[in-house]
Amino acid sequence: MNEWRILSRERILHLALPIYCVMLVFGVMDGTAWRSFLESNVAAAQRLVDDQFASVRKQVDRIETGQVRPPNVLEDPRMPAAMARTKNYEYATKPPGVTAAIAIGQSDLLASYVKVQWRPMFRQSNAGEIQNPETLATGVFDLSFVLIYLYPLLIIALSFNVLSAERESGTEVLLLSQPVTVSTFVLGKVALRGSIVIGLAVIVSTFGVLFANPEILSHDGLWRVGALGVLLILYGAFWFGLSVLINALGWKSATNALAMMSVWIALVLVAPTASNLIATELYPLPSRVDLVEALRRSDKEAQREGEAGQAHGSASNLLRMGQEASLDVLAHNFYMQVMQVEQQSEAEAAPVFRRFNAQKQRQQGLAERLKYLSPAAIMQVALTELADTSVRSFTSFSAQVELYHSEWRRYFLALVEANRPMTSEEVAQIPRFRYQPEADSVVAQRVVANILALSGIALIVVAAGFWRLRRYLPGAR
């Protein structure tokens, strides 16, 4: 009670705690708003493609029932090659997870919906947004930012002088003359501050996320919110343990503050950036110019082969056919040759793209291993895992898109080779994309690994701090 009365008189407590709580609430609200934005984008993309499929099927139905007749074969919506390449498409969408408000992660950098047609995925443009709000340019303030960057700052502000302030005010010797050890004395001060700061972080973050996203309870996402609470306790314990260790060195309060801020800069700002730079230097990505040049060469080859196919199709044997029959043969020959050339050009460009992806995966793998150098990096990865916005989550989405793209091409290629118009039933059977999120058990294993790593680091720092307190000499400096 006496420690609480002393702490309650400190201005930093009355100034920082309200701001801290407001930022936590704002982080939850902004993260929830971003999740709603992603949901609306995905829903808009889904409606757009559903309307497109319905429109194509309606056109085919009207042609089959004799209500309309296409002007020519090139404008016939039943042409499988034209439908696969230009007249139809699918949006492969990645709906945000129910706990996406925890961390924006990669969702503001990587697309949550991808347009799929015949062309290879690395040749398709998927950079456009259905909506382009100002937040895409300015960035988004989310809960993970508050917890990773600002949460430690409040701990530093309240604990950098838990022992040095007593020495500087001349009360240290008097307090330690009581039947209490230095470790017990410091533990009591840190426990009070920890219960306030960590308790607020856990309560406001977990209950805030649940209140703003009640669907978590009905989608088996409660374990993710519980894991968030555990991570916050461990992350807070690390920073309080660091304050104990630095106070145990017997420095002045100003020196303690400078030391803790230096560690904050090193672990929160420098270490994650350095890890990315190291990964980039060790595994540089191949030049995109090589891929662009390969694509240009393949485009020229496709155009040349297409013109040759048209010239071949307009030979004298076509002159003996009727105009409509000749146009059918020309169209079929053109599409078959162009699609074959496109596959050849894709095979030429694919090795460059595979090397690019392989190096990117090596970069990500090294960055994943280097995260253990910084508790902040571990927290960042763990929070994005809980929010389903991690690099692994989007890598899984990209792999699913590639598999679906192969399925799309196989389906239409068989129809093109059959050399006949598509039926209404075949249009209805065009494969659709269905995103499969990673199993909770798989995500939980990775989250548990991060929790164990963070708990190990926190335990080492806390143990080192209290071990150093045993050698502490009152009034030594």
Image: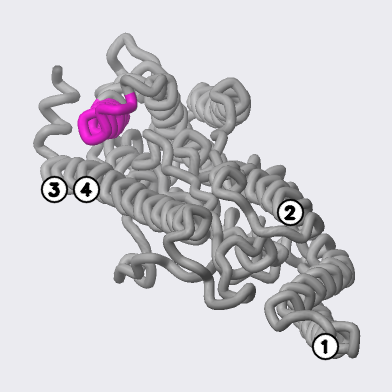
Please name the amino acid that badge 3 sits on: Leu
Residue denoted by label 3: 15
- Closest to the observer, 179 or 354: 354
Label 4 – label 2 distance at C-alpha: 54 Å
Question: Which image quarter holds the C terminus?
Answer: top left
Q: Nearer the viewer, mark 2 or mark 3?
A: 2
Task: Please tell me the numbered disc located at residue 243.
Answer: none
Q: Nearer the viewer, mark 1 or mark 2?
A: 1
Residue 113 visible in the picture: no
Label 4 – label 1 distance at C-alpha: 73 Å
Label 1 – label 3 distance at C-alpha: 89 Å
Could you say whether the residue bearing mark 2 is in a helix, strand or loop? helix
**456 is within the stretch colored magenta:** no
Mark 3 vs 4: CB contact within 8 A: no
Residue denoted by label 4: 26
Q: Nearer the viewer, mark 3 or mark 4?
A: 4
Q: Residue at x 64, y 68 (%)?
A: 82
Residue denoted by label 2: 415
Please name the amino acid that badge 2 sits on: Leu
Residue denoted by label 1: 319
- Nearer-N-terminus badge (1/2): 1
